[in-house]
Amino acid sequence: MVETIYGCKWSLTVYQLLANGIKRPGEMVRSVEGLTTKVLNECLRKNVAFGIIERIAYNEIPPRVEYVVTPFGRKFIRILDDLDKLQKEIEFDR
């Protein structure tokens, strides 16, 4: 799971968008240059399957979908942040 998520450059971007309050897919695509709807949907699907984020569909017209980080996802993202810090320390020490 860690390899799949950490290896996907867009997952980390999605976590940052969610942390900044951007929860809707269309808004995510508009916020990040180079991010396509297809790639975003694939990334979101993987993260939902792993339980890192949750998809919330509202029964409205037009349909509205939002994504939020789950409690497990908050823990997981903290671990990824720690891995990033460790990687930077390793690179700095070389």
Image: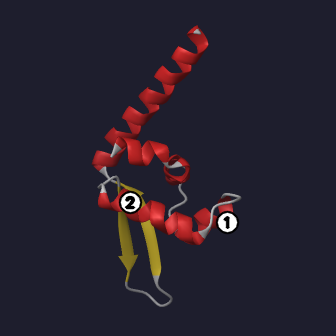
Residue 72, percent from left and from top: 28, 46
Amino acid bearing label 1? Arg
Front residue of 64 and 34: 34
* Residue 80, above or below 58: above
Residue 36, percent across and down? 62, 67
How did the renderer colour the structure? secondary structure
Going by the numbered disc 2, the residue's amino acid type is Lys
Query: What residue lies at 39% left-to-right and 79% top-to-bottom?
Result: 58
Label 2 packing within 10 angstroms: few (<14), some (14-19), many (20+): some
Displayed quadrant of residue 65: bottom left
Which of the numbered marks, if any, corresponds to residue 77? Answer: none
In this figure, what is the number of numbered marks? Answer: 2
Disc with the residue nearer the chain's start (2 vs 1): 1
Quadrant where the C terminus lies? top right
**Marks 2 and 1: CB-CB under 8 Å?**
no
Q: Badge 1 is on which residue?
A: 30
Q: In this rendering, would 64 be left or right of 79? A: right
Q: Mark 2 or 1, which is nearer the eye?
A: 2
* SS class, disc 1: helix
Residue farthest along the bottom direction in this orientation: 61
Q: Which residue is mark 2?
A: 46
Mark 2: secondary structure: helix
Report the front residue among 77 and 83.
83
Location of residue 38 (image quadrant): bottom right
43 on left or right of 73: right
Residue at the (58%, 71%) spot, across then down: 37
Of residues 75 and 6, the one nearer the viewer is 6
